[in-house]
Amino acid sequence: MLRNTLQLSGIFLIFSFLSSNPVSVTGQITDHRGFPIPFAVVEHPHSGKWSVSDENGFFHLLGDLRNSDELFIFRIGYEPKNFSLGGRTVVQILLNKHPVSIEPVLVEGKLTFPNVTSYTFIQGYGDKHSTHSHMDRIPGLQIRSYGSLAGNRSLSLNGGPGNHTKVLLDGVDLTSSQNGGTDLSLIPSALIDRITTSPMPGVFWGSGAIDGILSISSWPEETSVSLSSGSYGYRAANFGLEESFGSWAYHIGIGKTEDIGNYPVIIGNNSVNRENNYFSQDWGKLQIRGIINKKMSISTITIMTDQHRGIAGSLDALTPKTNKEDKLFLQSVSLGYALLKGYLKLQLSHRKSNEIYDSPGWFIYSKHRLLTDGAKFTLSTQSIPSIYFQSSSEWKKESINSTDAGIHKRNTISQAFRITWSPIQKLSITPAIRLDHAKDFYSEATYDLKISVISLKGSEFSTEIGTNYQHPSFNDLYWNGNPKLKPEYSDYRKVKWDHTFNQENFLSVTYIDRKSRDLIQWIPDETGWIWQPFNLAKTRRQNVTIFGKAPLKVLPFSFQGHFTLLKTLDEEDLKPLPYTPDRIGNIGLHFQGKVIGWSIQFQYTGERRDNTGTLMDSFIRGSSSLSYRPPIYGNRFDVTLIVENLLEENIQTIPGYPEPGRAFKLSLGYTQL
């Protein structure tokens, strides 16, 4: 198949026409104080394409957009605006309230404003076939992988455990109530469009957001098809269809990924083939969105993924006959209502998963069925010019039916309040409080307080204190667990300096000091065979993160990078936390021309110790991509070459689970604009 793909790519190269290349645009809409404006309609009159900004004011518009085109933005309570792109693909747009007139403000590259403590990372075309390259650009983030594409993948942000980072997909919480974490292998990389990160997001997200949230937006509304092939038996096909009817639109997406996945590894002095890494994934998506009237919009989304995989086991305990099946079903309905000075939003969500684990060699056969239903109502309003009020009311029902953990359920109700007070334009004070109650389990109150000062030259200095918690998972409570476990509790201090030099240059420096207590640890009894969880651990994590982006004036591409220095301590044994590196860094060079684009980046993961105290070697994960994207008759073809593990490093984030060596992938794509 790879040979046929190369032949097809040669045909596409012949038909490249040197015309102006259509572009997409991503941006943020704010008012003159820097507050995001949600539910603003962004329309491209030439093509009829449109988008609605989210709660942070972000929007993404894909279509036949030309550099000289204009966008039309309107929102109740604000003056409508015609906005000229002027060749920009990343923009910051300022809307004026009636009847004040202020010129637009543009910021390219950094999609944040002083009152939005988040960053958005847009997926490049080469990222759609890589398990790491997109997320490696996120500061302080480490992906912990159990080997190949078939292995589970979890996230660690700033050295924390995986269940301390919450992951959302189109607003639906992906957290497994069984283990408290998120397995990223359930989400196809081709389904991801952009990731918005909020390190230390405050109390509005409740349990599991101790270190932050990653909010993933799925495949954008476009008509496209792609075919891919690569090393170790990798193959993928994805198809999307988008149609608009006035103020309504729908998008259907389907895809399939297969990977034989077996690769050579070193065991002792011998090179052997690591077997039983097969992975098969089918997925589908249906999204319907519409503008009901000038005040009201609606969006519904359904996502299904179905995985069949082999479980190879660790190098010390190979499991050549073990396999697992996972099915994930997500559904969400969101209704937004724009107020003159704010908005209302109601979201109903549903998450269902089924897992079957079969290991004949270990005489294990287990089944787990999880259900999570939720409803969340959000109110944001600016009652007087200097005060911005937000509230969130939430209900969540979680249940499990497991051969190992039994049948259980948990109902949680939550209420959160946040006030942003700006007595003067350059100063904001934001206190917040949240109350969570789960009957027969726990009641928790958490808070945070942020103070932000903006200088005349565009720098922002902020300091923040607060508390977070993580409730025990069903496994902790019932899989030979401990029903008396308490939630894990954490308090933090944060200081941040952020500066935007011009439209393409920004730099931020962040320091976080976090202390946690009552962390859940599984320990053996006196026989050494039976393990149970207890609230034992106390830890402290400190980190300094530097993050920035800048164009290189002497060369036609941009530089982006981040570096995190971590100092962790287990206060029980006075040693660093296991699997937590002392340093994480990433540097990348990116170029996007009219027809050709390329990127190369290197992710450094420093030394860390495993559970036995053994020191694990540092490694550098390199990845690169080269894309040729000629416009043909107003649409676009894509030919992309991706290389992963560029330096052929021995990468192990979990001891005994090496990742594959250098891998090549070639993808052909077509997008209707």
Image (cartoon, rainbow, N blue to C red):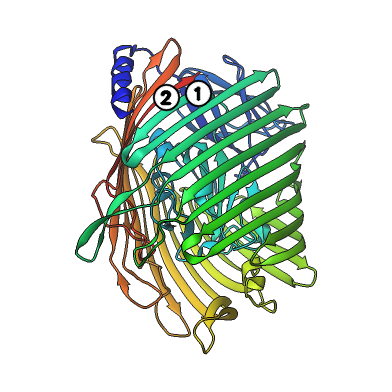
Residues at circles 2 and 1 in contact by the CB criterion of under 8 Å: yes
| Residue pictured at 65% horizontal, 32% vertical | 287
Q: Which amino acid, by three-letter code, is at mark 2?
A: Gly
All told, the count of numbered labels is: 2
Q: Which amino acid, by three-letter code, is at mark 1?
A: Ser
- Residue 125 located left or right of residue 244: left
| Residue pictured at 62% horizontal, 27% vertical | 251
Q: Is residue 192 above or below residue 181?
A: above
Mark 2 Cα within 10 Å, few/some/many (few <14, many 20+)?
Answer: many
Q: Which residue is mark 2?
A: 669
Q: Which mark is residue 224?
A: 1
Which element type, helix, strand or loop, lies under badge 2?
A: strand
- Residue 7 located left or right of residue 501: left
Q: Earlier in the sequence, mark 2 or mark 1?
A: 1
Foreground: 146 or 115? 146
Mark 1 Cα within 10 Å, few/some/many (few <14, many 20+)?
Answer: some
In this view, the residue farthest toward the bottom is 526
Residue 569: percent from left, percent from top: 43, 78
| Residue pictured at 23% horizontal, 66% vertical | 268
